[in-house]
Amino acid sequence: MQTAAYIGPSIHIKGDVRAQEPLTIAGQVSGTIDVSGHPLTVTEAAHIDADVKAHTIVIAGTVDGHLTAEERIVVQQTATLSGEVSAPALTVHDGATVQGRFEIAGHRQPVALKLAV
């Protein structure tokens, strides 16, 4: 079972956040967030003003910045997103607020299927 690092709702970070594991943010981060190769989850309570790099990014809170995902970005209905977004795939749920420049290009990494033998 893979665990995830967690930045709680009472935590405020100004600076660089780097992780080599999945990360969930419920607090406030200003600066940069780099979890390349791993998923980032931004909860409904979170406020992010940062440049973000991750394998996948799921947003339910407020994010302002330059977002780059290797696989996909998912914007939940409670999210507010503004800035520049770059990913091979983007999903925006009804009710989300989005504003900015979106570059949806590239190729997602294929998922290897395991066949039952």
Image (cartoon, helix red, strand yellow):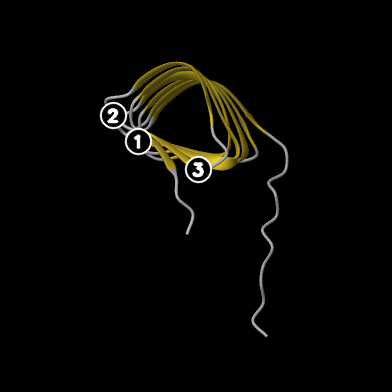
Q: Residues within 10 Å of mark 3 (few under 14, many from 20)?
A: many
Three-letter code, disc 1:
Thr
Q: Quadrant of residue 13?
A: top left
Contact check, label 2 and label 1, Cβ < 8 Å: yes
Badge number at residue 9? 2
Question: Which residue is identified by label 1?
Answer: 43
In percent of width and height, residue 42 lies at: 40, 34
Label 2 element class: loop
Three-letter code, disc 3:
Pro
Say which quadrant the C terminus sits in. bottom right
Label 1 element class: loop
Question: Which residue is identified by label 3?
Answer: 22
Whichever of labels 2 and 1 marks the residue nearer the N terminus, that label is 2
Q: Is residue 115 left or right of residue 24?
A: right
Q: Quadrant of residue 56?
A: top right
Three-letter code, disc 2:
Pro
